[in-house]
Image: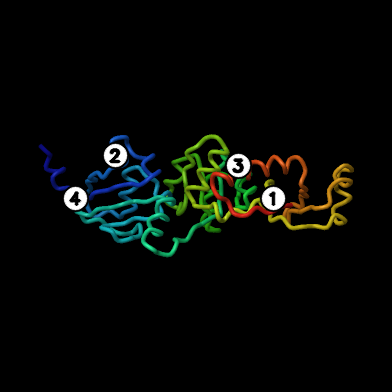
Amino acid sequence: MRSADEASRSRAEFRFCEELNDFLAPGLRKRAFVYAFNGTPSVKDAIEAIGVPHAEVDLVLVDGESVDFTRRLAGGERVAVYPYSSAWTYHRSRGCARPLRLSRFVLDVHLGKLARYLRLLGFDTYYQNDYDDDAIIGLARGESRVILTRDRGLLKRGAVTHGYWVRATAPRQQLAEIIRAFDLGSSARPFTRCIRCNGELQPVPKSAVAERLPPRVRAHFEEFVQCSNCAAVYWPGSHYDKMRKMVDELDTGLQLGKASHP
């Protein structure tokens, strides 16, 4: 028998989709369940009370209608909560315009290799190994960037608006995960950003950089690109061949956008 307090609480049915289930207790995953509450909490408050960081959520439907986080619950609602990946599937299946996708990122200190890989594919990616949480949040809010992190607690900060908890631990698996989660395959433009600093790469005449090149490079290569930010110079040497192979492997599985060549 329920106590008087339990009986007085309102209830709504929740269902979380796809990777959002990672945040739920095992008994609540991949099924609809009843959430009991007092008062009239916002959708955002209810989602986080259940255990899902609001920053991971891209779409909330209440009784079939899209709502924002401020929507209040009164009881009796059916709530479906979607992450980035399946929210896009939902819109596409109904012939709706694609939701705005943010493809500018800021990464926490645990994701340095992932940052290099995202830059390699041409995505605007901020990373420094001395960023603290406040710096990351400030950059995300100030420049409309998505926070990528291995720290769930960071995504529960109230100031965070867009974020994603990276599940995989191996960098290449992390990259594939992010491409799928944010539907980035068609947006990739490999070899257009500096993997060191994130600056854009531009073609540069050999004569303009010749004095900076090792003798062997100067003798055997004619095509170069230079970072517009840190002035690093790149050419299609052996390191490029290794990166090209990795991009080709990703392209096979993820249908990346057309690659550029330095």
Q: Nearer the viewer, mark 4 or mark 2?
A: 2
On the question of residue 49 being in view, the answer is yes
What is the quadrant of residue 61 in the picture?
A: bottom left
Which of the marked residues, 4 or 2, is nearer the chain's N terminus?
4
Tell which of 166 and 39 is nearer to you: 166
Q: CA distance from mark 1 to mark 3?
A: 20 Å
Residue 28's disc number: 2
Amino acid type, label 3:
Glu
Q: CA distance from mark 2 to mark 3?
A: 36 Å
> Do the numbered discs 1 and 4 sit on residues whose CB atoms are within 8 Å?
no
Tell which of 221 and 209 is nearer to you: 221
Q: CA distance from mark 3 to mark 4?
A: 51 Å
State how the image is colored: rainbow
Residue 10's disc number: 4
Q: Residue at x 38, y 58 (%)?
A: 93
Question: Is 49 located above or below residue 67 in the figure?
Answer: above
Question: In the rendered view of the protein, which quadrant contains the N terminus?
Answer: top left
Give SS at disc 3.
helix
> Do the numbered discs 1 and 2 sit on residues whose CB atoms are within 8 Å?
no
Q: Nearer the viewer, mark 1 or mark 4?
A: 1
On the question of residue 139 being in view, the answer is no
Give SS at disc 2.
helix
Q: Which residue is mark 1?
A: 194
Across the whole image, how many numbered discs are drawn on residues? 4
Amino acid type, label 4:
Ser
Tell which of 130 and 180 is nearer to you: 180
Amino acid type, label 2:
Leu
Q: CA distance from mark 4 to mark 2?
A: 19 Å
Q: Nearer the viewer, mark 2 or mark 3?
A: 3
Which of the marked residues, 2 or 3, is nearer the chain's N terminus?
2
Q: Which residue is mark 3?
A: 249
